[in-house]
Image (spheres, rainbow, N blue to C red):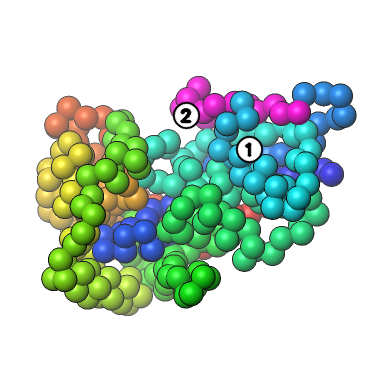
Amino acid sequence: MTTVTIRVPGTTANIGPGFDCLGAALTLYNQFRFSPLETGEETLKISVTGSEADRVVTDDSNLSYQAFVKLYDWLGQTPPPVAIDIELGVPLARGLGSSATAIVGGLMGANQLAGEPLSQAEVLQLAIDIEGHPDNVVPALLGGAHLAATHGEEWTISDIPWHPEVVPVVAIPDFELSTAEARKVLPTEYSRADAIFNAAHLGLLLRGLETGKGDWIAAGIADRIHQPYRQTLISGYDAVRSAALAAGAYGMAISGAGPTLLALASPEAASGVAEAMASAWQQAGIIAKGRSLQIDPTGATIA
């Protein structure tokens, strides 16, 4: 076995009406380096660098190591002693898929050290099993934008064309929102009208992303399944949305479970939208960073 390094992009998921099924890879990255340890050494060493590194656990409860072990369990093998060095570039607990990067990184690292016994499709299925839903782990592994749906017992994954003139802009605040908390506010049942609304708007959003038509994106990004409930947990949401639209964004959505907010804009408007969103939060007393990003086309890569 030799050292292997896996680079995994952060992601944005849901993107309005695509709740738990639509996600896209962004040009933000976490990196995971796996090095076999000599026999007789410790069974696990984890080091973490980058922003918020002190908040990542470095024992066997670390998510990347849990995923590493999961693959060996699937193979019916004992995981080898390993050192994992993690470089953070994706903010934690902000709705940008940091957990998905750990899961994908751990699985891919294990698969490489084990001699690649699993196909990409099998790694993807394990990732979905660990995460519980596909919208972050699928683009983290595959790159680009993807829609996932069940077909019987299997997942069917479709790539989603994303027009180069549609720029993802994120505003990342300095407070967190856990996925568990964001799910607690959701109702257990929805009306027929809301189901029809989301089906229609998801179709329109996908066409807008494919064609780059801003008016289709502006209408299609609307949602009635999760955003009306979750936005109440995000202080300053209305002000940031108003600022994004005033600066020329086509529309705005909650990235994943939040609190990061995602705007979609033209290349000409993107930088101004990023500045306006961050400024709106700062005027509300919340420190935030606005960033104009791109869609990562390749997903997780082996260095």
Q: Which mark is residue 79?
A: none
Labels in figure, total:
2
Picture coordinates of residue 283, whole percent (x, y): 14, 32
Picture coordinates of residue 211, whole percent (x, y): 32, 77
Picture coordinates of residue 222, whole percent (x, y): 19, 63
Say left or right for 135 vs 5: left
Say left or right for 291 vs 89: left
Q: Which element is circle 2 on?
A: loop
Residue stretch rendered in magenta on the structure: 43-58
Q: Nearer the viewer, residue 162 or 33?
A: 33
Q: State if disc 1 and disc 2 touch (CB < 8 Å).
A: no
Tag 1: Cα neighbours inside 10 Å, few (<14), some, or many (≥20)? many
**Amino acid type assigned to the residue bearing label 1 in the image:** Tyr
The quarter of the displayed image where residue 280 is located: top left
| Residue at mark 2 to residue at mark 1: CA–CA distance | 20 Å
Q: Indicate whether residue 47 is drawn in magenta.
A: yes
Q: Nearer the viewer, residue 163 or 81?
A: 81
Picture coordinates of residue 173, whole percent (x, y): 29, 35
Q: Nearer the viewer, residue 238 or 106?
A: 106
Q: Which element is circle 1 on?
A: helix
**Amino acid type assigned to the residue bearing label 2 in the image:** Ser
Task: For residue 30, say whether it is visible.
Answer: yes
The residue labelled by disc 2 is 51
Tag 2: Cα neighbours inside 10 Å, few (<14), some, or many (≥20)? few
Give the mark nearest the N terminus, 2 or 1: 2
What residue occupies the far right of the structure in this picture?
A: 39
